[in-house]
Image: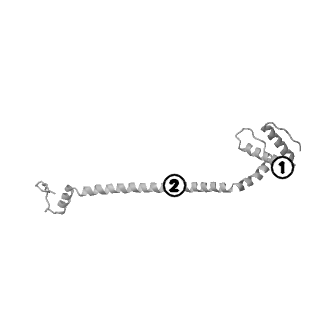
């Protein structure tokens, strides 16, 4: 082997790259070119550029050949994402059911409050002294009459 004198790091990298290029077989170089074509195709599909590369049948076939390998290598992440989506949907459904139940219970509570207020007002009306006296007069019971003496207060010492 011939010795080469190198002064800086960049020259060393260039020499190593040339040595690798010489040692690579044509199959390896072709595979690198295919991978780079696949990468270019994938990048062109997901890029925001307005330029659209021409999609040929070979490019689409290369992309579809790469997709199953990617899915197989990322199956755990995809499973985790699907589980998250499932939990999100079920949680939303459960929250919706609970909100509907809460609305029904609030309407029922409102109804019972109105019924309670109605019963209290009816009971208050029936228990008034004037109403009781009128009922007793209608029934013919004359033993009860209004008191003519004012009530007095009894003071109790502790």
Foreground: 80 or 90? Answer: 80
Give the quarter of the figure containing the N terminus: top right
Is residue 49 shown left or right of residue 27? Answer: left
Asked if marks 2 and 1 touch (Cβ < 8 Å), the reply is no
Q: Residue furthest top?
A: 7
Quickly name the residue at label 1: 28
Left or right, 77 with reference to 103: right
Q: Residue at (71%, 41%) from the top-left corner?
A: 47
Residue, far right = 1
Q: Disc 2 on helix, strand or loop?
A: helix
Q: Check disc 2 and report the residue beneath it.
A: 95
Picture quarter containing residue 158? Answer: bottom left
Seen from the viewer's position, the closer of residues 138 and 55 is 55
Q: Earlier in the sequence, mark 2 or mark 1?
A: 1
Camera-side mark, 2 or 1 = 1
State the mark number for residue 116. Answer: none
Dividing the picture into quarters, in which one does residue 8 lie? top right
The secondary structure type at the circle numbered 1 is helix
Q: Residue furthest left?
A: 149
Q: Residue at x 79, y 50 (%)?
A: 62
């Amino acid at each position: 082997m011939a010795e080469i004198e190198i002064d800086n790091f960049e020259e060393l990298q260039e020499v190593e790259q040339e040595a690798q290029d010489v040692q690579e077989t044509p199959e390896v170089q072709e595979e690198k070119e295919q991978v780079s074509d696949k990468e270019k195709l994938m990048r062109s599909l997901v890029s925001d550029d307005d330029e659209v590369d021409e999609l040929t049948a070979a490019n689409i076939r290369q992309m579809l050949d790469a997709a199953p390998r990617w899915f197989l290598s990322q199956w755990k992440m995809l499973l985790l994402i699907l589980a998250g989506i499932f939990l999100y949907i079920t949680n939303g459904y459960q929250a919706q059911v609970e909100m509907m139940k809460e609305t029904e219970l609030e309407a029922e509570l409102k109804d019972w409050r109105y019924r309670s207020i109605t019963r209290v007002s009816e009971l208050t009306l029936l228990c008034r002294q004037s109403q009781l006296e009128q009922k007793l007069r209608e029934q013919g019971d004359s033993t009860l009459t209004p008191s003519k003496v004012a009530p007095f207060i009894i003071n109790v010492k502790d």
